[in-house]
Image (cartoon, rainbow, N blue to C red):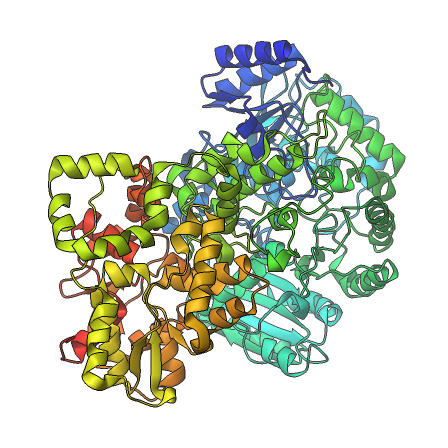
Amino acid sequence: MAAPQNPTERAELAQALRTAVRGEVDLGATARALTTMDASNYRRVPLGVVAPRDADDVAAALAVCRAHGVPVVPRGGGTSIAGQATGTGIVLDLTRHLRKIVELDPVARTAVVQPGVILDELRTAAAPHGLTFGPDPSTHSRCTLGGMIGNNSRGAHSVAWGTTADNTHALTVTRYGGDTLRLARGTAPEALTGLPGLIRTHLAPLRTGFPELPRRISGYALDALLPERGTDLARAFCGSEGTLGVVTEATVRLVEAPAARALAVLGYADEAAAAEAAPGLLSHHPLTVEGMAADLVREPAGLPRGGAWLFAETGGAARGGAWLFAETGGATPAEARAHAERILRAADALDGTVVTDPAGQRALWRIREDAAGTATRMPDGTEAWPGWEDCAVPPARLGPYLRDFRALLAEHGLRGTPYGHFGDGCIHVRIDFDLLSPPGVARFRRFSEELADLVVAHGGSLSGEHGDGQARAELLPRMYGDELVALFARFKDIWDPDGGMNPGILARPARLDENLRFEVLPKRPVDVEFGYPHDGGDFSAAVRRCVGVAKCRTAEPAGTGVMCPSFRVTGEEAHSTRGRARLLHEMLAGDTGDTGDTAGVITDGWRSTEVRDALDLCLSCKGCRTDCPVGVDMATYKAEFLHHHYRRRLRPASHYTMGRLPTWLRLASRFAPALNALARVRLLAALTKRLAGIAPEREIPVLARETFTRWLNRRWGKGTFIFSNDEVAMVWPDTFTEHLSPEVGRAAVRVLEAAGRHSIPAGRGLCCGLTYVSTGQLGKARKVMRRTLDRLGSTLGTPVVVLEPSCAATLRTDLPELLPDDPRSAELASSVRTLAQYLEEYAPDWQPPRLDRPVVGQTHCHQHAVLGDAAERRLRERAWLTGELSGGCCGLAGNFGFERGHWDVSVACAEETLLPAVRAAEPGTDVLADGFSCRTQLEQLGGVRARHLVEVLAEGLGEGTE
């Protein structure tokens, strides 16, 4: 099926869709670029995106597309791993409007949902009734019920609750052309002419051609239509990967959720030994039996002793080389624990433990759930890719299969990290295929063919969870034979005689080595400013980090997480980390000079307005650097893009004002009283904000009458600078502490002196370059950083206490990445400490004042992403400051929240977690915010004076700051 090729035909299609559909119709470059890929190795360029408002819109869109001969692909969260959520025609975005839980019946234990409902939203709605939806893939925080039906998803609890098909009662489905069918157990609808005859005349192959195993997802489930199985058309539709029709409503089964859970963690020599042990645990009726090899775990933290600790101590050999996670449930914590302990005693494990603490369980599950991302990088940094992500064999064959699988990898010179649903015989793995060169792609094909034969030899299924898509459908004849595969094509034709639903997937599939998303990228490294040390200096490799697992699309931050605040506010894919990475990918593809339907959608390179507009609402919070399982660093990519986009061009006013804030504040500090008075004149302040590119709703911060370094040098003059080198604490005079909140610096001096450390300024005129980096003025940033290194001179290597988290993060990461060839940058970066880190390292015996007060506030996003807050947590505990700080981002984020046009998003970010937590705090609670931006946001939006932790500690010492 050929899509419209010329502009006239495309314009006619767009007009017809806009006339027929009430939802959004977008055939622009941004919408197309955002949907070229899912979480697979594949890329197909669509004509545009339609976001239907309801089932009538879905039918109207399908009717228009059929009339114009345009293919359609339904899309949920876009996390499919085999390429089935990509297409060349119209993408139906079912996540924007079709997100309603129509009905939830706790007595019948059913729910009626629209296809765009996020799994976690359904689970949250069912939880008050003690119910849940059983299938739970690791993408549960962003995958949709429609996508789960399309792929027949399972997840970690499949040994207890089965597949999505097992939990689906009925479906309302719209076919290509617009007619709607109701699918349930019983007889086939009359509209599906020929289906009863197809089943009746091929009973023998349908009864004998499908292997019996827990996770057989490959192909169409035609055996569900056998009369002895009730002719369950809804079950047969599950796993059809958008090739038959579009689900507009589903009735699903809910299951009872255990009131309490425990986790038995069992250590084995290797994953094959763990796999052989897994079937023996099933008789104890666990909720899960998950397996994970030690080479998936980069650090031992978070795994109980006997697992990662033994792995670390033995260098990955012998003991603790793999784990099984066996989760149990119970009516009480004691019952769940007893159940887990029975499994622990029965298991033939080298080591094991039972984890009952919910926080400890969540930490362990996060390692497992993030595996789809973390496994994309080998321990040495080599890229690894899906393609053979989820084949399954009978559980009793899993151990031998894994040994043969490892041997096949070695034969092809490949590496992979197996993990997955060992209790069901399903293995996930990312493999270090070379998908960038023709020889590498050829090896990818040979390996895929041989692995398919190996899976079949063990009685398995090419797909055990994520579907065949483009990755495996070509190989289905090796599993099913030609006769059954021919029946698949006839089944597809009965449903979709025009071939408009997701062509190239499942029936008559594209080749597994076609449409690879990497082939359109530049073949040579792009000329960039940052060093990208974790990507070999290659910006294309940095952008390739985004594999599409879409953890950035979660509706709320996980715990203390940050990523991705702009998406949570707008709900737009373009404002997610993944969306921005997709736009950058298409920008690079469009800059190669290739033409045709597979060329990059963004064609004007670094000058792209589409990329600029998407990055405009990136807060540069750096949350993705840590929270993204593969470490996408969009703040750095944004700075890189802005540098090139505005090179030799007029910049926004805010880049000249806030982007060069250190310079302006140094000049203004001598006139602070007069400037503060002028800023209180309303008309003058309004004019200043307009000229400076500042949001009119913002208040201009007050300048300090005396800078921090002037105050500290006055103390120096009193003789406090005579001390031995091992007692020195060199305090960094960041721009914000220096000119806007010197009280933080003064408090730090008091605390350091109380701890037996003497404070000296790191020097005057020093600057980390933060504001220049965040506005993409990288040439200027590099000059500022070199000047700073020159001025530090012989003091380089001395520990430096940096009070402003954003400046500390800049020194730790941006400095060495912008000056990778200057060894002094790495030396300074390694010297940076937060105050809590410094005290823990250099004054470990100091006891802070006992404050006995609750606290509320927010961990700075840059601290979370780059520095970590473990030392701050311990310091608060030692000072008897109780309570947890919020995750997320305050929304001010340096210059972002001050810039014109960002006010609404900035406020919405603050209202997500920070402001509600502060409003809910009891009287007498201290509000903590170590970042100047966070304190400013709280003051301007909440009327609350927040303080740096060091100010609270200094107050507890009972001394002034003079």
Q: In screen coordinates, is 155 left or right of 650?
A: right
Q: Nearer the viewer, residue 665 or 896?
A: 665
Residue 692 on image: x %, y %:
28, 39
Q: In screen coordinates, is 513 left or right of 162?
A: right
Residue 374 versus residue 71 in the image, above or below? below
Residue 600 on image: x %, y %:
65, 31
Residue 790 on image: x %, y %:
45, 67
Q: Nearer the viewer, residue 425 or 82?
A: 82
Image quarter (top left, top right, bottom left or bottom right) of the N terminus:
top right
Residue 916 visible? The answer is no
Which residue: 43% across, 55% down? 558
Q: In screen coordinates, is 253 left or right of 125?
A: right
Q: Nearer the viewer, residue 862 or 262?
A: 862
Image quadrant where residue 63 sits: top right
Residue 684 visible? The answer is yes
Image quadrant where residue 206 sits: top right
Residue 495 on image: x %, y %:
70, 22
Q: How many marks?
A: 0
Image quarter (top left, top right, bottom left or bottom right) of the C terminus:
bottom left
Residue 262 versus residue 939 in the image, above or below? below
Residue 128 versus residue 419 in the image, above or below? above
Residue 806 versus residue 19 in the image, above or below? below
Which residue: 46% across, 23% down? 54
Image quadrant where residue 536 sits: bottom right
Which residue: 35% across, 45% down? 896
Q: Nearer the viewer, residue 895 or 296?
A: 895
